[in-house]
Amino acid sequence: MKLFSHKPLQVVFGLVLISLLAACGNSGGGGATAGNTPSSGGGSAAGANGKGCTKVGVLLPETASSARWDSKDKPLLTQKIQAISGVTVDYYNAEGDATKQQSQADAALTKGDCILVVGAHDSDAAAAIVTKAKTQGVPVIAYDRLIQSKDLAYYVSFDNVKVGALQGQYIADHYKDYVKGSSNNTAMINGSQTDNNAILFRQGALSALQSLYDNKTLTKVYDQYTPDWDNGKAQTEMEGVLTAQQNNLQIAYVANDGMANTVIAALKQKKLNGKVLVTGQDATVAGIQNILTGDQSMTVYKAIDKEAQGTADLVKALHDGTDTGTITNGATVKTKDGTAIPSVLEVPVAVDKTNIQSTVIADGFVTVADVCQGLPKGTGGIC
Ligand code: BGC
């Protein structure tokens, strides 16, 4: 596999902050700021440490944007956090509504939840959740999506610029199988602009694609964010692209499997499925099926088990009042205002028809029975 030259602007590894991070584990919500400048930040974070906390609020952003939230994140987070002795989970899903997520956080705090794990629907709006939690001494762990708050205690996710780079590099490595002469049209259907991840995915993809656009190897005919990662909207977007390009399209960079599935539906209407390189992300059952049938080219496998485990490890350390530095290992991600948030970042893996077996199936992330359901025997060499 090639190495990519991407710029992980927001990812700063290797800071020797172990001792400060240890202090951070005790100062919770104010820890990241305190780690940099002990005197900065809005007053004392005393008590904001989650120590002895037995009720953890888990707030997820949506269900419709990706199958992952309900099928993976919800059960794995619940199971791993509840494996900590005496700890229970108070679960919420905002169903794509930032205002609803704020109310859910308010309800969780009222109930006495003393650590919050928040998968933000809106990375900026959710800062208000962190601010309020801090006033009540409750540390917030941003789950999967960064929250733009200097008071954030921790961030657990994947290297999201790398996710986009894997998608973009796949196109760079395989466009020749789809592009013929000057027929090199490329559409980019990105995720939601209010999700910090969507911005990082596009940034990563462009790190591999921009030079191909610049030297006209590929022609970018469309590049839009898709509000709420709305899968139905992605289909409408693709229908519009096909109409505008008179069905002349060779590459569809699509940010996740949910949107790739509806993009493929639009391609099927024009009998173009399998003739256009389509990317995805999440290694969902539907995404892997689309790869097996040849309608989707690749996906990005993110081992959510590890992401949930990293989160549970932090919850346990907060609960026990022990050092979190051995969990974050000095890794930090910066919020927009430059605050370094102690972070756990897992590694994403590109998956196409050549490595489904050795990655997502070998790991038990999907089963052969699930991905082959309804597919003819022999499909993709796996069914
Ligand atoms: C997640 C992706 C997911 C997308 C839509 C992103 O923040 O990282 O895994 O596909 O949201 O739910």
Image (spheres, rainbow, N blue to C red):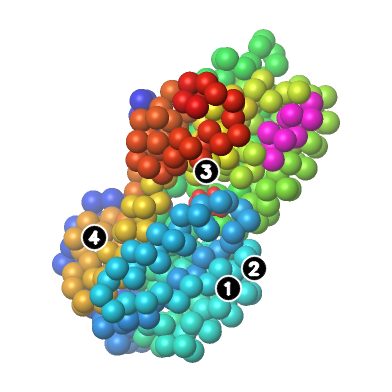
Give the amino acid type for the residue marked by disc 4 in the picture. Ile
Q: Earlier in the sequence, mark 1 or mark 3?
A: 1
| Disc 1 from disc 3: Cα separation | 25 Å
Query: What residue lies at 53% left-to-right and 58% top-to-bottom?
Result: 70
Q: Which residues are magenta?
A: 262-270
Answer few, some or many: residues within 10 Å of disc 4's Cα (few below 14, many 20 plus, some between 14 and 19).
some
Query: Could you tell me what secondary structure mostly forms the magenta stretch?
Result: helix
* Number of the label disc, if any, that sits on residue 97: 2
On residue 327, which mark appears? 4
Are there few (<14), some (14-19), or many (20+) residues within 10 Å of tag 2? Answer: some
Q: Residues within 10 Å of mark 1 (few under 14, many from 20)?
A: many
Residue 235 painted magenta: no
Pointer 3 or 4: first along the chain: 3
At label 2, the amino acid type is Asp
Q: Are marks 2 and 1 in contact (CB under 8 Å)?
A: yes
**Lateral position of residue 159 relative to residue 231, left or right:** left
Which percent across, then down, holds residue 9? 41, 48
* Mark 1 residue element: helix
